[in-house]
Image: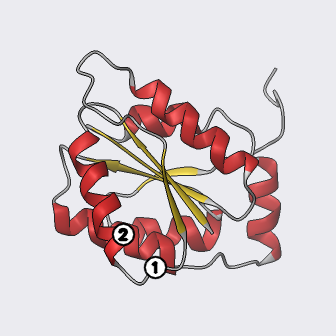
Amino acid sequence: MRLFLGADHRGFAEKQRLINTLGESNLECEIVDLGPTTVKPDDDFNDSAIAVARAVRENPYSRGILVCGSAHGIAIQANRFKGIRAICGYTPELVKLGRLHNDANVLCLSADFMTTEQIDTAVKTFLETAFLPEERYIRRNRRLDEEDIYG
């Protein structure tokens, strides 16, 4: 599995810490940093969310992690891409449900409102929880990619 990471200026330090932590773990996946590589105070969260969403969409069985101040903007941007199911991972319970029921493939984290321990637990839960392939979840997730259903 490939794990794509991205952040804006508010999530940059946490993304870098995560890359180091994940690199030192026994995690069996390729970690890909999609940037930025330096802090850019005037950047937009959109850029990293777009980069990670595209990478996850183009690489089946991959996942993504995005970090910004609140996690809201990156989640909204990532979810604009067909096939992306981005969730805000504020608690381990929410992350677990997102993986089990929604087959979430992008985890959005808040550098401003989550502690390092909360972020590490969310990431661990995201990576270790498998999708529960029940018919109702498959059907519901398929419907997420229906185009312009509301006109």
Quadrant of the frame with the N terminus: bottom right
Q: Which mark is residue 36?
A: none
Q: Amino acid at mark 2?
A: Leu
Drawn side of residue 140 relative to residue 114, left or right: right
The quarter of the picture where residue 141 lies is bottom right
Give the Cα separation between the discs numbered 2 and 1: 7 Å
As helix, strand or loop, the secondary structure at mark 2 comes to helix
Horizontal side of 41 relative to 95 (left or right) equals left
Tag 1: amino acid: Leu
Residue identified by numbered label 1: 27
**Left or right, residue 146 beside residue 114:** right
For mark 1, give the secondary structure: loop
Q: Quadrant of residue 148?
A: top right
Q: Mark 1, residues whose alpha carbon is within 10 Å: few (<14), some, or many (≥20)?
A: few
Q: Colour mode?
A: secondary structure
Taking the spot 40% from the left edge, 28% from the top edge, the residue there is 45
Tell me the residue that label 2 is attached to: 22
Work out whether mark 2 precedes mark 1 in sequence or the reverse, and give the earlier one.
2
